[in-house]
Image: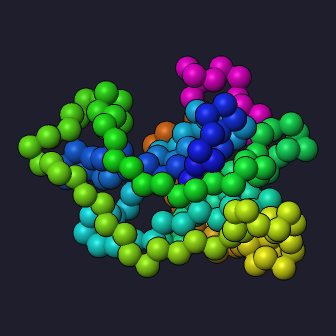
Amino acid sequence: MNSDTDAVRDELDFEFLGNRTGQPYTVQTNIYAHGKGDREQRVNLWFDPAADFHTYSIMWNHHQIVFYIDEVPIRVYKNNEARNIPYPKLQPMGVYSTLWEADDWATRGGLEKIDWTKAPFLAYYKDFDIEGCPVPGPVNCATNSRNWWEGTAYQALNAMEAKRYRWVRMNHVIYDYCTDKSRYPVTPPECMSII
């Protein structure tokens, strides 16, 4: 999802980084808020995403952003604007799908190169669904408490989601910018949040 603005872009990304044959596929999530990105997390998937369709979802409301795969939360980004941490909520975003070349870094740090003999590269989607505020829409749409995604059930993970999220964090996260001391000698403030 992208606000389609350059200077103060907001963006929520699901990125498939590919894999080495026989190895797990890696999904990277990234969040841009008010023009600042570099909030990557990478998860090795526990299944082969090319073998069947799976459900990839983003729950984005005024309280949190949660990335899900098949109803399993793989990433949580809390709204900490009260602590002066940017949170994407002021701009509408569109949904985009792209295939782009990033073999200088994306697959095992650039060790695996794209096999261009396998082109064209295709992605398939089915049962695509978007629920949210229309653009342009009523000024109060995003803060309307009658919108199901703003309800109390979606302000934090429930007990089952929290259990699944801990499982992903313990068994499948292979990179988290919050713990990358070479990039961030001082832990970014949003990383101090507890889900």
Left or right? Give the position of 25 relative to 163.
Answer: left
Corner quadrant of residue 40: top right
Residue positioned 31% across, 53% down in the render = 24
Q: Is residue 176 above or below residue 155?
A: above
Give whichever of 47, 131 is nearer the camera: 131
Q: Is residue 190 magenta?
A: yes
Give whichever of 79, 132 is nearer the camera: 132
x and y percentages locating residue 101 in the rendered image: 31, 37
Q: Residue furthest left?
A: 117
x and y percentages locating residue 144 in the rendered image: 86, 71
Instruction: Work out whether residue 74 can be spotted.
Output: no
Residue positioned 80% across, 59% down in the render = 62
Q: Quadrant of the C terminus?
A: bottom right
Corner quadrant of residue 150: bottom right
Q: Is residue 151 above or below residue 78?
A: below
Q: Main secondary structure of the magenta part?
A: loop
> In this figure, what is the number of numbered marks?
0
Residue positioned 61% across, 34% down in the render = 6
Left or right? Give the position of 105 relative to 91.
Answer: left
Left or right? Give the position of 21 relative to 102.
Answer: left
Instruction: Work out whether residue 50 can be spotted.
Output: yes
Query: Magenta segment range?
Result: 179-192
x and y percentages locating residue 157 in the rendered image: 71, 67
Q: Is residue 180 magenta?
A: yes
Left or right? Give the position of 59 relative to 71.
Answer: right
